């Protein structure tokens, strides 16, 4: 009789689960880092990124000054959205210290590629008539750097410019870049990239809501705009975090992860907002996995399982 009661109870529970709102049965996860149970906000920050060179240099100067004036704990809370243009320039900064066409001007003349030489030769600039090929390239490089920095009136077509002249011209910029790169490196672990086929194994942001995330996306964390949902869900390959204040909230019994989007006009707005005070860096949550459950031998007959259960109890 006891066995029958247990069996009917199990069947009843299975039937009820079909209609109950389950939050955690299949979503319980653990993180590689020791993260205490609780609620976390992973706020996304987007800053308008300029197109022209002069606007970019002003942007980087403002960004660096802002980052200098916030502490490392606040830097660790910045989940910066990186678009394709920003990604390209950040990569160039990290690899060479230069952006845009600065790198063409700052390279050793002998190391320029064919395409870079073609670009220099396309510039309408006079060079010393009796100078050799390398000297003409050096003059064109110096002219390019003057043009980029709005100092083109300083160019002297009869002067033989050197590598040292280029370095002295860009010295102040290089000193600022060293500080900027150091600060950006502190943010890099929390970069969130706009969806791109080239971005793998890094967090991405999907601006438009879709009810189905492609299984081909091998990104550990995906942020997705949604008007209806908030919290997070665990997919096959991804941790899906909804961005917004949707009424239908998903969480687990141990964690609640929320996200909001902040679109800033300039870098300085970061220190004027409270968006960093309650934000956590996404890097803390990247290494996750489903919680391992004790394996059950499905081949064991129910009669045997009940017998074992009775023996224990």
Image (tube, grey):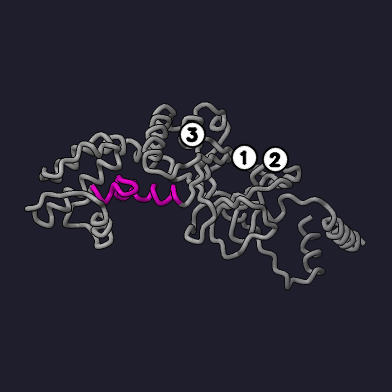
Dot 3: within a 10 Å radius of its alpha carbon, few (fewer than 14), some, or many (20 or more) residues? some
First-in-chain label (3 vs 1): 1
Residue located farthest toward the right when viewing the structure as drawn: 1
In whole angstroms, how far apart are the C-alphas of marks 2 and 1? 8 Å
- Give residue 260's mark: 1
- Position of 114 with respect to 100 (left or right) is left
Q: Give the image location of residue 258, x and y in percent.
A: 64, 41
- Position of 214 with respect to 12 (left or right) is left
Q: Residue at position x 44%, y 47% from top? A: 86
Q: Residue at position x 28%, y 49% from top? A: 103
Which of these two is toward me, 241 or 105? 105
Tell me where residue 14 sits by quadrant: bottom right
Look at the numbered discs 3 and 2 and tell me whether their residues touch, using CB distance below 8 Å. Answer: no
The verdict on residue 184 being magenta is no
Look at the numbered discs 3 and 1 and tell me whether their residues touch, using CB distance below 8 Å. Answer: no
In whole angstroms, how far apart are the C-alphas of marks 3 and 1? 18 Å
Q: Of discs 3 and 1, which sits in the foreground?
A: 3
In whole angstroms, how far apart are the C-alphas of marks 3 and 2? 25 Å
First-in-chain label (3 vs 2): 2
**From this viewpoint, is residue 208 visible?**
yes
Mark 3: secondary structure: loop
> Can you identify the residue that label 3 sits on?
266
Mark 2: secondary structure: loop
Magenta residues span 85-105
**From this viewpoint, is residue 36 visible?**
no
- Location of the C terminus by quadrant is bottom right
First-in-chain label (2 vs 1): 2
Q: Give the image location of residue 186, x and y in percent.
A: 40, 40
- Give residue 245's mark: 2
Dot 1: within a 10 Å radius of its alpha carbon, few (fewer than 14), some, or many (20 or more) residues? some
Look at the numbered discs 2 and 1 and tell me whether their residues touch, using CB distance below 8 Å. Answer: yes
Residue located farthest toward the left when viewing the structure as drawn: 130
């Amino acid at each position: 009789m006891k066995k029958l009661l247990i069996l009917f109870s199990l069947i009843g529970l299975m039937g009820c689960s079909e209609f109950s709102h389950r939050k955690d049965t299949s979503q319980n996860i653990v993180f590689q880092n020791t993260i205490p149970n609780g609620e976390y906000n992973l706020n996304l920050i987007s800053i308008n990124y300029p197109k022209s060179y002069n606007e970019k240099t002003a942007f980087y100067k403002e960004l660096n000054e802002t980052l200098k004036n916030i502490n490392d704990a606040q830097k660790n809370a910045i989940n910066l959205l990186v678009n394709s243009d920003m990604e390209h320039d950040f990569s160039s900064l990290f690899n060479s210290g230069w952006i845009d066409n600065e790198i063409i001007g700052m390279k050793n003349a002998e190391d320029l590629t064919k395409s870079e030489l073609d670009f220099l030769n396309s510039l309408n600039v006079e060079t010393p008539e009796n100078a050799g090929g390398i000297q003409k390239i050096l003059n064109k490089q110096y002219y390019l750097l003057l043009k980029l920095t709005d100092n083109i009136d300083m160019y002297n077509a009869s002067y033989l410019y050197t590598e040292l002249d280029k370095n002295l011209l860009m010295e102040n910029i290089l000193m600022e870049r060293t500080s900027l790169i150091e600060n950006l490196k502190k943010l890099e672990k929390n970069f969130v990239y706009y969806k791109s086929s080239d971005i793998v194994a890094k967090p991405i942001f999907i601006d438009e809501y879709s009810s189905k995330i492609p299984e081909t996306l091998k990104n550990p964390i995906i942020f997705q705009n949604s008007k209806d949902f908030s919290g997070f869900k665990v997919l096959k390959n991804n941790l899906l975090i909804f961005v917004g204040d949707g009424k239908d909230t998903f969480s687990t019994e141990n964690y609640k992860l929320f996200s909001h989007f902040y679109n800033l006009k300039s870098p300085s707005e970061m220190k004027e907002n409270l968006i960093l005070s309650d934000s956590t860096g996404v890097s803390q949550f990247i290494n996750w996995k489903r919680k391992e459950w004790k394996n059950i031998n499905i081949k064991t007959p129910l009669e045997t399982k009940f017998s074992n259960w009775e023996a224990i109890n």
